[in-house]
Amino acid sequence: MISELDLVHLRRCVELAELALSVGDEPFGSVLVAADGTVLFEDHNHVASGDDTRHPEFEIARWAAEHLTPAARAAATVYTSGEHCPMCSAAHAWVGLGRIVYASSSAQLTAWREEMGLPPGPVRPLPIQQVAPGVAVDGPAPELSETIRALHRRLHGRRP
Ligand SMILES: [Zn+2]
């Protein structure tokens, strides 16, 4: 179930994804929100550096491990424009973070890539819960799908 408040944070993730694209990175953005609603940390994708592990959800997991108690991590929510990849799902679970809310799913991204004639990525696009079965997950948010699809089309030089 995605609430209006969830949508506020998801829209911020999409803004961060747009920002990433505008500076030459892939369009993914994520936000870490504490149990009391405070935004603790936000980041976007940084793979243009040449390091393809620089996903925002991975940065959030590392930040949370350094700055939050285990209880605060478990009570926090991670919002993200695109569903966690298996690497980030694993990092999320290893550091004991709480709920995940994503705007678009890995299945959607896979379909959009196929639509653009792109080959599959190097990592199988498993859903979060196949990697991290104990994590509560909500998504996708259909109202944001077309915006995110358009960002991926821009990334690959296609018209939105
Ligand atoms: Zn990832």
Image (spheres, grey):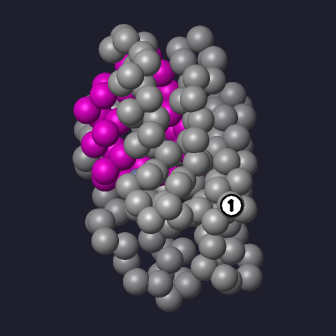
Residue interval drawn in magenta: 74-101
Q: Give me the residue at 63% from left, 17% from top.
A: 38
Q: Is residue 43 left or right of residue 122?
A: right
Quarter of the image with the N terminus is top right
Residue 109 visible somewhere in the drawing = yes
Q: Give me the residue at 37% from left, 73% from top.
A: 121
Q: Compared with residue 64, is residue 15 higher up or lower down, i.e. above or below?
A: below
Q: Compared with residue 131, is residue 121 higher up or lower down, i.e. above or below?
A: below
Image quadrant where residue 17 sits: bottom right
Image quadrant where residue 67 sits: top left
Q: Is residue 56 left or right of residue 81?
A: left
Q: What element carries label 1?
A: loop
Q: Is residue 85 left or right of residue 60?
A: left
Reading the image, the residue beneath label 1 is: 23
Q: Give me the residue at 55% from left, 84% from top.
A: 116
Q: In this view, does 110 lie to the left or right of 128?
A: right
In the picture as drawn, the residue positioned furthest to the front comes out as 49
**Residue 91 lies in the magenta-colored region:** yes
Please name whichever residue, 98 or 66, is drawn nearer the observer in this view of the structure.
Answer: 66
Quarter of the image with the C terminus is bottom right
Q: Give me the residue at 38% from left, 22% from top.
A: 66
Locate residue 111, reporting x and y percent. 49, 74
Q: How crowded is mark 1: few (under 14 residues within 10 Å), some or many (20 or more)?
A: few
In the picture as drawn, the residue positioned furthest to the bottom comes out as 117
User: Label 1 is placed on what type of residue?
Assistant: Val
Locate residue 115, reporting x and y percent. 54, 83
Locate residue 50, reporting x and y percent. 44, 65
**Residue 85 lies in the magenta-colored region:** yes
Number of numbered callouts drawn:
1
The answer to whether mark 1 is within 8 Å of ligand 1 is no
Residue 108 visible somewhere in the drawing = no
